Amino acid sequence: MTSIATNNPAESVGTAVQPSRRRVILFSIVTILFWISMYTYVPVLSPYLEDRGYSFSMIGIILGSYGFMQIVIRLPLGIWSDRMGIRKPFLFLGFAATILSCLLFLIPGHWIWPLVGRATAGISASTWVGFTVLFAGYYAKEEATRAMGTISFLTIVGQLIGMALSGWMAEGFGWSSVFLAGAVAGGVGLVLTSAVFEPKAELGRAPMQAKDLAAVVKNPLLLKVSVLSILAHSILFITMFGFTPSKALDLGALKSDLTLLSVFFMVPHAVTAILSGKKLAPRFGPWNTALAGFALSAACTLSIPFLHSFAALCATQAINGFAQGLHMPLLLGLAIQEIEPAKRATAMGFYQAVYALGMFCGPFLAGWLNEGYGLSAGFYLGGFIGVFAAALTFFWRKARQ
């Protein structure tokens, strides 16, 4: 086991005790606030942009800018973090960027402001590499999957709270209220981050070198799960974090009903994020669990164009949330499972930069298809991506047996 020195003798080198409960609780609160700030406006973003008169293709560009920024800066941030051997400054950067993102959406007029606002959210999301690696440092190396399962659950809790507030606030207080709420949550998180504990760098740790990057990104497991994560995030940002809310409004839902849609998706997603790493993957294997997730997600996405009621849409999204909770945390944990702690931020930066391709390409292509062929076209694209991901998972599962 690679040990981590801390300020707490009970967590000294060579021990495998549980991390400090107080530190985990504080970090959990900060993490939840981060994702509340990031996701308070997500369910209403596509309808909000439609309401402002933007075309589906323009909406796709704005939504895709979130992923584009992560493609550009996530890996450099990971390398920078590993070279410095610290993660906490990136938490501060993440909160500052998400506050600015929310405020930029409040500027009326030109399309440039929502575009820059969403791109700034991509900068904030890029700092997530610091959150994940810092939290992994609270646990022993062999518990990486457990740590990532826990932080994935916290992520979903924050997203759920933010998304649950979104539709209700937009209906009762107007579009601007959701962006203000996100900025407030980010401000509180920024203040609390100052109290977050960061473990000291490993004893004898060599600084990250440029030559280490090639060795990290050549890891076969990291490459495979990165490809699968591109596909997983393409589906997610085409559907629930993309155009599914627009489909709900087309079916006659109110803006406040988007809160209910978010709950139907996120609650099963949160439950399976915990179960997949702790119960399902140990019993059925991570590859079988991920395969089931992709297959279910593909089926749900392909069914969306055929739905004729908001209730049916909620039902499919409940299954879809369950399905995506099966593979998302597993891919995150597998990405750093074979990577030594000193290089984990680089590996995580690579992984998150690569899967950001899905965040960019998914909504961008779906927006273009929706503009030319109607809203259903993007869901067909997402469904076929799910089928392809399931096929790749099946093939790579067989190769590892």
Image (cartoon, grey):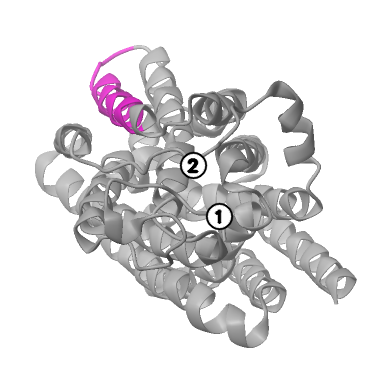
Give the answer, above or below, for where 1 lies relative to 398.
Answer: above
Give the answer, above or below, for where 235 lies relative to 285.
Answer: above
Tell me which residue sits at (48%, 32%) in the image.
Answer: 126
Tell me which residue sits at (55%, 33%) in the image.
Answer: 67
Pointer 2 residue:
202
- Mark 2 residue crowding within 10 angstroms, few (<14) / some (14–19) / many (20+): some
- Mark 1 residue crowding within 10 angstroms, few (<14) / some (14–19) / many (20+): some
Element type at marker 2?
Answer: loop
Please report the bounds of the magenta region as a residue range.
Answer: 91-109
Image quarter hosting the N terminus: bottom right
Q: Which sits in the foreground, 248 or 12?
A: 12
Q: Position of residue 51 (x, y in %)?
A: 33, 34
Q: Earlier in the sequence, mark 1 or mark 2?
A: 1
Q: Is residue 98 magenta?
A: yes
Q: Is residue 157 magenta?
A: no
Is residue 378 among what the camera can see? Answer: no
Pointer 1 residue:
2
Quadrant housing residue 175: top left
Tell me which residue sits at (61%, 39%) in the image.
Answer: 343
Q: Which sits in the foreground, 232 or 72?
A: 72
Image quarter hosting the C terminus: bottom right
Tell me which residue sits at (49%, 40%) in the image.
Answer: 203
Residue 283 lies left or right of residue 202; in this view the side is: right
What is the three-letter code of the residue carrying label 2? Glu
Q: Position of residue 150 (x, y in %)?
A: 40, 64
